[in-house]
Amino acid sequence: MPEFNLKIRRYLPESGEAPYWQEYRVELDGHQSVLEGILKVRADQDGTLGIRCSCRAAICGSCGVKINGKPRLACNTHLEFAAGHSPEDGTIVVEPMGNMPVVKDLIVDMEAVHWKKIRRVSPWLLPEGEPPEREYVVPHEAMVDVTQSMACIQCGACVSDCLSMEVDPLFIGPAALAKSYRFVGDPRDGQHYERLKDVAEDPHGIYDCTHCFNCIDACPKGVAPMSQIMRLRRAAGSHGIEDRNNGHRHEAAFVENIERNGLLHEADLLPDSYGGKLHPRALPELMSSLPAITKALARGKVTPQKALLHPHRRHYHQVRKLIQAVESKEEPLELNLYITGYEEDVEATEHEAGETAAMREDVQEDAKNVASGPQKEPRQ
Amino acid sequence: MPSHDVLIIGAGLAGQRAALAAAEAGATVAIVSKVHPVRSHSNAAAGGINAALNPEDTWESHAFDTVKGSDYLADQDAIEIMCRAAPDEIIQLEHLGVTFHRDETGHLGTRAFGGASQARTYYVADITGQALLHVLYEQLLKYHEQIDRYEEWFVTSLLQDDAGECTGAMARDVRDGAIEAFRAKAVIQASGGAGQAYKPTTNALICTGDGIAQAYRIGAPVMDMEMVQYHPTTLVENGFLITEGARGEGAQLFNSGGERFMERYAPNKLELASRDVVSRAEQTEINEGRGLDNGGLALDITLVPRKRILEALREIVNIGRDFAGVDITKDPISIRPGQHYIMGGIRTDNLGRTPVAGLYAAGECACVSVHGGNRLGANSLLDTLIFGRRAGEDAATRASGLPMPDGNLNSRITDEQAWIDSIISRDGNGRRVAQLKEELGEAMNQYCAVFRDADGLDACLQTIRRLQEQAESVGIDDSGTVFNQDVLGVIELGYMLDCAEAMVVSGVKRTESRGAHFRTDHPERNDDEWLKHINVTRTEDGTPEISYSPVTITRWQPEERKY
């Protein structure tokens, strides 16, 4: 049986010592999990090593840790995979998750961060009026849709790797916002508007996410928290919620700016977000960002030429075609973990697939053009 | 010192359902769990929950299927209560927010399950248990003013007053090692099964029979403990569960010759015969040399349409990929029978009351008995909810008429602390807790499994007795107070050994074959002698004492069982 080297971040709060690294060697099959490796260490060598674990099958969410720097469940990460992706020559590096205080070894304080944030979004169904005599009759697709966020096992991996939370610890965060979508997407809930207003108006709410995709990468269950946050934003928009953080207007301006220019024209973005250069609210915003603009000019990050004559406009019609294709759909296209439908609709599936492939070619073509754009513009 | 009307131990479905019911009835409630509630093993119940909710279905049909599934050992009055209450419970859960699967008309849709004469299993993809558990936890959060949650508190023993009534529990805060006495007018054990006494098992690492052993130690009888369910489809590699939902959706079983062998064992229900029947068929195929080279049999899920797999069996797509390296939409997966559930547990009446006044039990740790010799798939979630609710309601009623138990518990706290300190300070006997646990698990899986006989069970009992002795002096590494999982492991080992002992002594006694208990030396069912429950009670000196109680038969007389 192959031998694996586990390097584990230890912290024993009662010892009075700072955290330290400890290495262990275990003999196990490569397809066994990092959790099994840790449990073997605990069984045979060192019973003081702390880790939460229960189901061993990636359904209870207990064993979230960082393996080689990435948040994962220890129970569904194979030893050979981990060794193969080691930054330290085959040694598997295991440490506690980030963004949460460490209690002992690999055990973090989920209560102080994760659960507090979950409770922040009133995580229970709030139906309107008396329930029906039998079940609520709701579309099949709606239940499949929220099942993606129901699939969350509250392991905290997304919280661990959330960049926004690192900068703003008050950010409601990916797990709790995905939980919020579970109710906003549920036709039985009667508080969609109030929920959306709440997470839109909170300065640490849905517009605090920076689209870094870390939570999507981190999630072991395919919940894709960032996608749920984007759904919340779209829903807030369609409920006409103009939040005081200007998040919604900023987002709308972003899309409009790209549709107009083919590629983001940053100089226009800020005024656009506040209603255009001539809007009374845009002026103070522009004034207040003058120092930043001056600095950017001084450092050559912005040039008057670039700011006034946006270089990528010639591709705009392809991008506009894309945006129009997406917006012409009656129902927004949502990618879901749980596929719905039956094998009988092969034709429909193939038709859709064809359409998507055609669109993908367009996009690739476009991406090529866009990518070649800046190279033609010599840096100044 | 925490004092509540109702103290609930365990925060899986039974515990959480009991907490909501007791709170709704006006009681003050504490719910204590050694893990965070959403880590509970109810998560693992993938396939669904049974109810005769469809207008064409009847509770009688559901009840009869359950009686037949139990091989006539279950109590028919309890089954009647459960099956009658099932439809309302499903509707209530739906109203609380469970995202049950809908059919094309937007109404609740069902899937087929083993041992059932109708498709009456309601489900959420293949995460039904998880969906239910998380929705109930949402409700605990909603009712946080009435329900105090003690998350990551490990119960070490139950409290009993001079009259023998249960008056609370002692628990250790896993986070800092503090011992606390929880006073209560009624205590509900809802701490789950004891599958970790087996290796391999589908059960989570936390399923160590804590509540069963704690109740047993203060004199509550345990019942039907010989009835241990082996699930027909667990992964050959590591014993992980492949939901019965797979077969419900159309997956089939094949032996090494490519034969759909269930045609020989259960010509009508085939793969969807009850679990004991399918597991026995599989074990026979394996024992007679018709298994695959890896010791298993083939479960072919590719027969299920791919889109349907991706919608309804998503979790086993992951399990197949992560733990067996198989894409179940393309290739068959190797399975074998594996320990999954214990039908037995703390004996209760239909309100969840145990013979010890003030002590209730619900869920897998309890034995009402609605499962008898063999539990039907998708009846366990139902059992936890119906009897969790009933126990919660009755415990609240009991509490409303009683004063809070008094008496100084400081000396009790000191004693409990001294006991834990004594474990920590042991020199040890050269063996490690994990070794003892492994030896126990292997013995149980060898001798107290799908097929059993007197010699094997005797050998197993001797192993258990020796391990009990060794467990008394086994040493540990961790002497800390913060998350000392080492010391809790010793206490859990003791719980598992108590449960295993009760399983094996009951198994030795039952000299017939019924449900999951198949004695190769007594292969026939013997209703004349054995249509009765075996009870095990702990005597003063710690040895188990056997007694019997009658099976309640209301309208279904025992008949030959064929699928």
Image: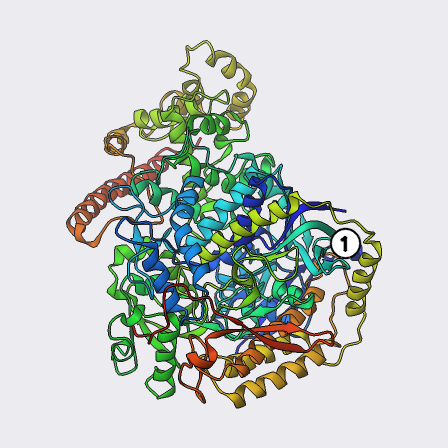
> Which residue is more in the foreground, B226 or A50?
B226
Q: Residue at x 40, y 46 (%)?
A: B88
Q: Is residue B412 left or right of residue A285?
A: right
Query: How many marks do you count on the picture?
Result: 1
**Residue A140 picture quarter:** top left
> Which residue is more in the foreground, A20 or B179?
B179
| Residue A52 image point, x, y percent | 61, 58
Q: Is residue B94 left or right of residue A106?
A: left
| Residue B294 image point, x, y percent | 39, 81
Q: Residues within 10 Å of mark 1 (few under 14, many from 20)?
A: some
| Residue A229 image point, x, y percent | 44, 36
User: What chain does mark 1 sit on?
Assistant: B
Is residue A5 placed above or below A126 in the rendered structure? below
- Classify the position of the C terminus of chain B by image quarter: bottom left
Q: Amino acid at mark 1?
A: Ala
Residue B112 visible: yes
